[in-house]
Image (cartoon, grey):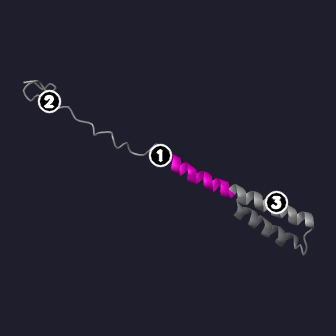
Amino acid sequence: MTPEQFCYWLQGFFELTRAKKLTTQQVADIQSHLETVFAAASTTALQRELEKIHTFEKVKPNKTKHAREEPTYCSRLGERKCSS
């Protein structure tokens, strides 16, 4: 559950129950769940950023690699370059 989803759920809880007061346990449960979903969201965001960096490192162009040279042909024989 994302933090946004939990907040919508909590809003719905208050609207449906019309609760005027919360017990100490309910407040503690809400705080605990908020900490959990926000920590998970932060971890997920951090993981995404790390994956971007890791993927970028994998696909970095190799600057020492040279362009592939096409073979040249001897126009006389139609074969690879002859040594004439």
Name, please, the residue furthest toward the front: 64
- Provide the residue span drawn in magenta: 41-56
The residue where tag 2 is placed is 73
Horizontally, residue 56 falls left or right of residue 72, namely: right
What residue appears at the point 11 percent right and 28 percent down from the top-left corner? 74
Q: Nearer the viewer, residue 58 or 71?
A: 58
- Residue 62 lies in quadrant: top left
What amino acid is at disc 1? Glu
What residue appears at the point 74 percent right and 58 percent down from the top-left corner? 37
* Tag nearer the camera, 1 or 3: 1
The residue where tag 1 is placed is 57
Whichever of labels 2 and 1 marks the residue nearer the N terminus, that label is 1
- How many C-alpha atoms fall within 10 Å of the one at disc 3: few (<14), some, or many (≥20)? few
**In x, y percent, where is residue 75?**
9, 30
What amino acid is at disc 3? Ser
Check if mark 2's residue and mark 3's residue have beta carbons within 8 Å: no
Whichever of labels 2 and 3 marks the residue nearer the N terminus, that label is 3
The residue where tag 3 is placed is 32
Please say if 68 is above or below 48: above
Quadrant for the N terminus, please: bottom right
Please say if 1 is above or below 64: below
Q: Kindly report the secondary structure that dominates the magenta region of the rendered protein.
A: helix
Give the tally of numbered discs.
3
Name, please, the residue furthest toward the bottom: 20
Q: CA distance from mark 2 to mark 3?
A: 75 Å
Whichever of labels 1 and 3 marks the residue nearer the N terminus, that label is 3
**In x, y percent, where is residue 70?**
22, 35
* Tag nearer the camera, 2 or 3: 3
- Which mark is on residue 31? none
Q: Secondary structure at mark 2?
A: loop
What residue appears at the point 76 percent right and 57 percent down from the top-left corner? 36
Horizontally, residue 82 falls left or right of residue 3, namely: left
